[in-house]
Image (cartoon, rainbow, N blue to C red):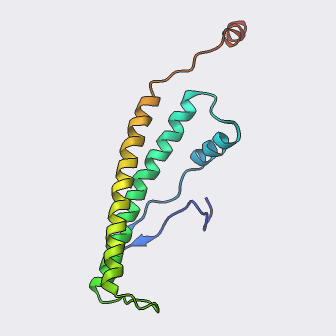
Amino acid sequence: MGEGHPLEFAGSVRGGVVPGSIDHDSIRALEELQNRGIRYPGEAHRIYSYLTRVAAELRTALDLVGTSVQGLHDRGLLMSDYRGEPLDEVLERFSQSSGRARDLAGDLHGNLSKAHSAVGYIAYKETPEEQESAAGS
């Protein structure tokens, strides 16, 4: 993916590196899903694999952002903006909302992992025409 792609999230955060770009095959699989649906269960497995990775990275990214904001606050580098709401109230709202978002991302990851595992047990059943065509090849 090129620099500035909307699905790319890369950069350094407090000495660590945020996970890089999303792979092209996964994006292509999602585009195909939008355009034609799923033809084979392996495609669903691949898409769930991608979504499971994204959910895991989402939680990690939320943790990194929260830690970074806290670090800025600890160093006295934050203040309330022009609206004048007390900084402590804004940070409390941020902390609570971010915590809920991390929890939801964790739940999403867990459920996607279960679905990913389950869809791996689904096989494609060929139609009689497909079986005849394959036998004649």
x, y (%) of residue 46? 52, 37
Q: Quadrant of residue 7?
A: bottom right
Q: Quadrant of the N terminus?
A: bottom right
Q: Along the line of sight, which residue is nearer the eye, 21 or 38?
A: 38
Residue located at (65% from left, 35% from top) = 37
Residue located at (72% from left, 7% from top) = 136
Picture mark count: 0
Quick check: 46 above or below 105? above
Seen in the image, is 93 located left or right of residue 9?
A: left
Residue sticking out furthest to the left: 74
Residue located at (47% from left, 92% from top) = 82
The answer, for residue 15, to whether it is visible in the render is: no
Q: Quadrant of the C terminus?
A: top right
x, y (%) of residue 61? 40, 63
Quick check: 12 above or below 51? below
Q: Quadrant of residue 8?
A: bottom right
Q: Quadrant of residue 32?
A: top right
Residue located at (37% from left, 90% from top) = 79
The answer, for residue 52, to whether it is visible in the render is: yes
x, y (%) of residue 111? 39, 42
Seen in the image, is 113 located left or right of residue 9?
A: left
x, y (%) of residue 25? 59, 45
Seen in the image, is 125 located left or right of residue 114?
A: right
Q: Along the line of sight, which residue is nearer the eye, 46 or 114?
A: 114
Quick check: 109 above or below 117? below
